[in-house]
Each structure stands twice: as C-alpha cells, then as structure tokens.
Amino acid sequence: MAIDLTQQWFRDLAELRYVATPKRLRALLGGRVVLDTRDALLVYEPRRVVPWYAVPAADLHLELTEQDPAPVPELRAPVLPPRHAEWHTVPGRSLHLDGHGEVAFRPDDPVLGGRVVLHWEPFEWLEEDEPVMGHPHDPFKRIDVLRSDRHVRVELGDVVLAESTRPTMLVETGIPVRWYLPRDDVRMDLLTPSQTHTVCAYKGVASYLSAEGAPDVAWSYPDPLHDALQVLDLVCFWRPAVVRVDGQVTDTSMPGEP
C-alpha cells in the first residue's frame, strides 16, 4: 500500500526520533568553548518539529545540576511551540547551569546513549566552522525558491495590501508555501516597520511590518542567508491578511498554531 509521506510525518510526531550527524559541533558560552564533539545526534522530542543537538556528556564542559523537568501544560495543537524549550515530552532529567536556569535535558531513553540534549540558548553554535542561527540544520528539510507568474492578491478586510503577477514562491519542508512579492507591488505606504524580528536557520533574520490593526502582518529578509538570496527585500504576508493565489485563499498558518 502506498504511503503518504506527509501523513507519515504527522504520525511520527508522537515518537522520539533521532538521526546521527557527521558534523563537528562546537558551542561557546561567553566566548569559551564548552562543547566540542564529533559524536552528536539530532533529536526530535515527541510533538517537536525542530531538532536539538544531543551530545555525549563527556564532551560537555559545564557544571550542571539535576532537577525535575517542568510539567507540560495541556495544549490542543499537536505541535509544541519551539519557544518553550523547557517543556519535555519524554522522561528524563532537567539540567541547570548556575545563572542560566535549564540549559539541557537528559532523556532516559537508552537508545540515545546517555547523551545530553542542549538548549539553543544561551550558546553560540558552530557546525564545522560555520555559525548556525535559530536551531540546528535539519537534514530532512530544505527550501526551494522559485520565480512565478501566478496572480497573488493580499487583502486586509476591504483593503488590498498587495497585488502581483511576479511573485516568488518559497517552499519549505513542513511549512505552508510562502509568497514573496516585489515592494513595487505592495502598498508600502500602508505598512510601518515593526520592532519584531525572528530567526530562521535557513533564511536568516526577518524584519516585520505592521498595518493598521494588524501588527506584524508581513516580513522581509534584508540580509538573507545563501539559500534565500532570491527573496532579498521581498515582502511576505500572513494572518490576519488573506492571501489569494489565482483567486484561491492559501494557508498562512504556522506549525503549532491551533
């Protein structure tokens, strides 16, 4: 019987998943190397779509203390939001660093060989000699950026915020398709810069734009990473704006939203 890989991906969300990585990983704290390993795993806890590094305790040079992990609240969404790294969905021990709180977690599962799963913050990360931002790079995810001639129209109530027949389509594994539009096709006079910024491990740092009654309704990448150079300074919209592609409303949600 044929397998729908998207459905399989959702079914596997309930499991503790891992994959080996051939990369040398280093973590710095306050300019000091506190981790240097060539024996890491990428670990995806149940209900997590973003992996974290799991490293041998012997390669981690920190004085950590054990505590009980924080309880996970009842959430309707099948995916846990990435900002709550302190929530763990498998048995294990919370590991704390003086002055920083929980910075790591040691799952009980013996398959992981006693490795310690590190939080992204407060560390600076290198894969080989390349800095990594946001979260570890996932070997099962990628982005495609494609020029298109589809008709994209963005509405906020009765106001048309953008309309274009020369969008750029960005396809990212596990995320709804995003449509990036030239600024000449966007009502930039109706948008104002926001103080909000988010980090994507594959695209870089996004700067947000707000419309009246719709904070952070759009974003752009003023200095994208290599894989996203084609969306430099283009504008992408999401909720509460309505994005229509060839007349059809498209999904602009994010994993983990109700």
Image (tube, rainbow, N blue to C red):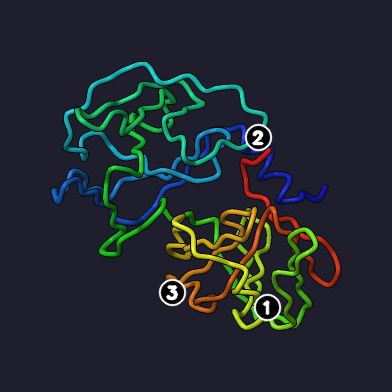
Numbered-mark total:
3
Q: CA distance from mark 2 to mark 1?
A: 31 Å
Q: Position of residue 86 (x, y in %)?
A: 41, 30
Amino acid type of the residue tagged 2 in the rendering: Pro
* Residue positioned most to the right: 247
Disc 3 from disc 1: Cα separation: 19 Å
Distance, label 2 to label 3, CA atoms, is 32 Å
| Residue drawn 47% across the image and 62% down it | 206
Identity of the residue furthest to the left in this view: 32
**Does residue 57 appear to the left or right of 20 in the view shown?**
left
Few, some or many residues within 10 Å of mark 1 (<14, 14–19, 20+): many
Q: Secondary structure at mark 2?
A: loop
Q: Which residue is mark 2?
A: 78
Q: Position of residue 145 (x, y in %)?
A: 60, 74
Q: Residues within 10 Å of mark 2 (few under 14, many from 20)?
A: some
The kind of secondary structure element at disc 3 is: helix
Cβ–Cβ below 8 Å for labels 2 and 1? Answer: no
Q: Amino acid at mark 3?
A: His
Q: Which mark, residue 226? A: 3
> For the residues carrying marks 3 and 1, which lies nearer the camera in this image?
1
Name the residue: 67% across, 50% down: 253
Query: In this rendering, would 43 be left or right of 75?
Result: left
- Name the image quarter holding residue 60: top left
Of residues 258 and 216, the one nearer the viewer is 216
> What amino acid type should be assigned to the residue bearing mark 1?
Pro
- Asked whether, in this view, residue 232 is left or right of residue 33, the answer is right
Mark toward the start of the polypeptide (2 vs 3) = 2
Circle 1 is placed at which residue position? Answer: 167
Disc 2 or 1, which lies upstream in sequence? 2
